[in-house]
Image: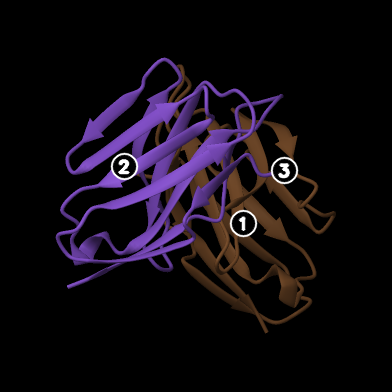
Amino acid sequence: DTGVSQNPRHKITKRGQNVTFRCDPISEHNRLYWYRQTLGQGPEFLTYFQNEAQLEKSRLLSDRFSAERPKGSFSTLEIQRTEQGDSAMYLCASRSRVGDTEAFFGQGTRLTVV
Amino acid sequence: SQQGEEDPQALSIQEGENATMNCSYKTSINNLQWYRQNSGRGLVHLILIRSNEREKHSGRLRVTLDTSKKSSSLLITASRAADTASYFCATPRSGGSYIPTFGRGTSLIVHP
C-alpha cells in the first residue's frame, strides 16, 4: 500500500494519559499536514511540515500538543494530559514536493478519551 | 478562518438521480479540491481544479469553477447508493503556506 498510513486506527485512553499517533506519508512527499475532525465538522488544520521543518501551527494546537517529523519522513503527533474534548479523528495528509498538487489523506486515528 | 463553505449541508436523492453540491469561498485561490469521506474513514481525493480551468470531468463527476463568483460545484451524475458520503471542498488558506482548508461538507444520501 503506497498511500498515507496512520497508526493506530483507534485509540481509547483515560483522561490525563498521554497518547502518540504516527503518520507515514506517501514516499517522497515532503509536505505533511495534521488535521482534527469532530463529528459533523470538516477537518480543522493543526500543523504543517515541509521536510522536517514545522512551518505552521494552528492556534488549536495547544501546549499539550506536539508534533515532530524528525527525518522529514514519518511524523508523530503527541497529546499530553488528554482531555475529553480531545476526542476526535486525527487525520494526516501529504503532498508532493512538486507544484500545485492535491493532498492525500490517511484513514485517520480515532481517539476516544474516557 | 474557514475559507470554503459547502451547500447544501444535506442532500437526499434516489439512485439514478444527479446530485449537485456547491462550494463558495472568500479570497482568490490557485486551485480548489473536492474530497469524499465515507463515515468514519479518511478523505478520498476526487478532483483538483485550477484557477485557469472552468470545468473538469472524472468519470461520473463534473466540477466547475467560477472565479468571478468565487464558487465551485460538484455534479455526480447517475448516482449510486455507494456515493453516499460527505463531500468537502478544500481551498488554500489565504496567506502563508499552502494549507488546504475545509468547510463542514455536504452529507449526501443516495437511496437505493
User: How far apart in space, not on screen, are marks 2 and 3 (Cα)?
Assistant: 32 Å
Residue in the foreground of this view, choosing between B64 and A83: B64
Local SS, label 1: strand
Amino acid type indicated by mark 2: Thr
Assess whether mark 3 and mark 2 are in contact (beta carbons under 8 angstroms): no
Residue at (75, 80) in percent of width and height: A15
Identify the colour of chain A in the image.
Answer: brown
Q: How many numbered markers are drawn?
A: 3
Q: Which chain is purple?
A: B
Circle nearer the viewer, 1 or 3: 3
Whether labels 2 and 1 belong to a single chain: the reply is yes
In the rendered view, tell whether residue B46 sits above or below residue B106.
Answer: above
Other residues around mark 2 within 10 Å, as few (<14) / some (14–19) / many (≥20): few
Circle nearer the viewer, 2 or 3: 3
What residue does disc 1 label? Answer: A36
In the rendered view, tell whether residue A97 sits above or below residue A72.
Answer: above
Which chain does tag 2 point to?
Answer: A
Q: Residue A2, how many percent across, how many down?
A: 31, 42
Q: Earlier in the sequence, mark 2 or mark 1?
A: 2
Local SS, label 2: loop
**Quadrant where the image shows the N terminus of chain B:** top right
**Quadrant where the image shows the C terminus of chain B:** bottom left
Q: Residue B40, how many percent across, how many down?
A: 43, 68
User: How far apart in space, not on screen, are marks 2 and 1 (Cα)?
Assistant: 23 Å
Residue in the foreground of this view, choosing between A46 and A32: A46
The part of the image, by quadrant, that contains residue A19 is bottom right
Q: Residue A27, how many percent across, how many down?
A: 40, 33
Residue B10 visible, this orientation: yes
Local SS, label 3: loop
The part of the image, by quadrant, that contains residue B81 is bottom left
What residue does disc 3 label? Answer: B1
